[in-house]
Image: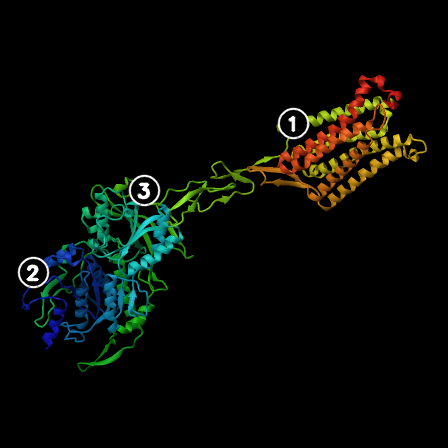
Amino acid sequence: MLTLLLLFPLVTYGMQQKAKCSLNLIKDYNHAVNFYRPGNYLISGIVSSRFIGDRLPFTFSSTPLNFVDAFVNKRGWQILNFVLAVQDVNHKPKLLPNITLGYSIYETLFDGRTTSDALTDLLAGGKIDIPNYTCGRQKTLLAVLERGESDISMHIAGMLGIYKIPQLSSGFVLHDKKQSPFVNCMVPNEAAQYDGVVELLLHFRWTWVGLLASDNDNGEKFLSTLMPKMSKREICAAFTKRVQRKTSLWFSHEPSPLWRQVNVFVYYTDSQYGFYAIMEVQSFFERTQTGGKVWITTGLQDNILFYETEAFRHAHGSLSFAMKTKKGAKKDYYEPKASASWQKAFVCSYSKHALSVRSWERCREKKNQMLLPQKEIEGIHSQDSYITYYSVQVLAQALNAAYSSRSKRRLMVGGGDKMELQRLQPWQLHSFLKKVNTSADGQYLDENGALAVDFDIINWVLFPNNSKARVKIGSVERQKSANLKFTISPETIVWPTLCKKTMPHARCTKSCCPGYAKKIQEGKPPCCYDCAPCSEGTISTQEDARECIKCPEDQHPNKERGQCVPKAITFLSYEDYLGILLASFALLLSSTTGCILGIFMKYNETPLVKANNRDLSYILLFSLLLCFLSSFLFIGRPRKVTCLLRQMVFSIVFSSAVSSVLAKTITVVLAFLATKPGNRLRKWLGKSLANSIVIFCSSVQVVICTTWLGLSPPFTDSDMSSQPGEIILQCNEGSVAMFYAALGYMGLLSAVCLTVAFLARKLPGAFNEAKLITFSMLVFCSVWVSFVPTYLSTKGKYMVAVQVFSILASSAGLLGCIFIPKCYIIILKPELNTKEYLTAKN
């Protein structure tokens, strides 16, 4: 019955193996290989260094050591790392006094069935693998260290969980601690590594990349973690692809055109044979001369240095992340080179129990045999080696803590007293494993139980002499502020051969030059965008700007809108052609007014000068002189004093001039009305009425200007927005209402004066001054009526120039229309300068 139960699994697995003699030494190479050494406690290791297809059948016809030599040369360095780590603990008596660690390591060849056989052998004990039966072998198993594929690691967790045996795994990352409570993840915290990948892509401005990941839970975690980080930094995944263990099942010999367009691949693999995917894809692109492709991977380890040159050539120029260990760490966890010392360290045998369907190849370490001298250890510092060494250290520290907390018990052995430490069961170790948070070289576990380490950025290089090396080109270090310190030396990077020694381009579209901003295209990834020129007043100083920014108020964009340049300061200055022209006219008209005033003073006793109130003529001429001179307050750099005076002086002086004209007009009308018999207006004639009109009308303007100064006086100001590229220095009027009130009052006086003069234009007399006043006021009003819209429609110094021109033109109109005819008569026609002529009706 027992024989039938043992043969039943063979039918299930479809095997048709015939019964073999127990002494048959023909090796069954589809089974695991076991390396072991006895001890007080055993640490088991489940490792995979090779696929089944890599193992070739051979016999022990000559000596079993041939297998060991072949195995080491076939990348058996993982087992050596395990053995060296255990040996290192046993040589530290202070760590585990009076306790020797043994090991039982299984090479399972990445195969699920082989791993299951190894676990059955480990858990059963004895020569016949029957679960729950010890069959003579002492149960000293303490914990299991494994590094396999993530799916195999989960199956291991299921089997070990039945017996609550601690599992230290570096094969997969736990998503839910409740589902696997006895698993301790020894993989490094990859968050810093993923952030480093993003920083590396941003440094080289690679925003259009392909993502490849192992077809398991670890690969799913990689994609779900990295893609949001990439999207946040505007890096797009052109495609995502799951890589199966056998690459021929997923990679088509004619991939989509998208694969040809993408020049950078980010590849996550948790298998030491993930390098085969790179080999297959790279070889295809090299055959088709598609162009250079750069691989950024999180899984390339130092074991690829053991590959043949032709195989390693496909990894040339690739970039990867390797765990950085502390300085001064133990140097025994390195990849050793196969040597005669290793071959002499183990004795191997091939056996199969008569009642068992499984055959085993077991290699036992020779007693008191040092594995490798320190001088023969080759110094290649790898992530796998460190994790193995660290895991063994963690177990040793947990075991030490457990015994430190337990009391001794007395046993009677052979009739005498002997003190013996109470044996620790595997399930009792869990609480102590949780308390171990530091390693021998100072590394520590984070809050999630993962190894918190920094990473080096590695460039894999094949030199012309076919030598292979990993070259450190940068690092990703954690900071206390939860940020990362990313450093890289791009000048030291060796790019793939097909890249022709230049950094490859990995973008969906061309970069937007400075002066342009990215414009997202509807229905396309954010990395595929158009470039839109910056709008007026904005710039972009860098390539691929997300948006254009405004320049400071005192600066403006240059022609290319790539940078801000200082604005030019402008005002109506004496150096400008416009300023020179207006100043020249003001000076000419002022001189002309002065000359006319001199003529009138010289001929002050002539009838023409004395007619219509000589004093009013003097007041008008003096007011016009001040009007011309007031225009100089508007020319030049605005200052506090000139801003306060210019509008006030202009308003009051012009009001005096218009008041004088109004007084003259009223005087003319009253003079003709007074000539009629019985008219009572005669008593109003005289200087008192004219002076009263001038003083009253001017006083109203003085009150308006005083109120203006009291409420909101003018002040110097800078207009930075009216004219592009210019800062306009100007006088802010303070209260715009008061400015237009003063201007409106002058307009009211002008309208009244024009109306009165127009009504008196037909009064009899050879020289009717009312006609001259009417024409002058028409000119005056026309100038100031056109001033308002023109003033409002101009900006900067041209606004000031419009006001100066209006002052000069209106003043010149009054001067020319009223006084030039009189000067003509006084200078050129003195015979008409008589009382008879002036009083004549024709």
The first of marks 3 and 1 along the sequence is 3
Residue 227 image offset from top left, x and y in percent:
35, 55
Secondary structure at badge 1 equals helix
Q: Which mark is residue 60?
A: 2
Residue 807 image offset from top left, x and y in percent:
71, 32
Residue visible at 31% across and 51% down in the picture? 239
Q: Which mark is residue 747?
A: none
The residue sitting at the right extreme is: 678
* Residue 127 shows up from this direction: no
Q: Disc 3 versus disc 1: distance between alpha carbons?
A: 61 Å
Q: Quadrant of residue 707?
A: top right
Residue type, numbered disc 1:
Ile
Q: In this view, does 123 lie to the left or right of 805?
A: left
Say if mark 2 contacts mark 3, CB within 8 Å.
Answer: no
Residue carrying label 1 = 580
Q: Disc 2 versus disc 3: distance between alpha carbons?
A: 53 Å
| Mark 3: few/some/many CA within 10 Å (<14, 14-19, 20+) | some
Residue type, numbered disc 3:
Met
Q: Disc 1 versus disc 2: distance between alpha carbons?
A: 113 Å
Residue carrying label 3 = 503
* Residue 414 shows up from this direction: yes
- Vertical placement of residue 171 versus 521, above or below: below
The first of marks 2 and 3 along the sequence is 2
Residue visible at 5% across and 65% down in the picture? 24
- Vertical placement of residue 709 versus 98, above or below: above
Residue 608 image offset from top left, x and y in percent:
85, 23
Dot in front, 3 or 1: 1
| Mark 2: few/some/many CA within 10 Å (<14, 14-19, 20+) | some
Dot in front, 2 or 3: 3
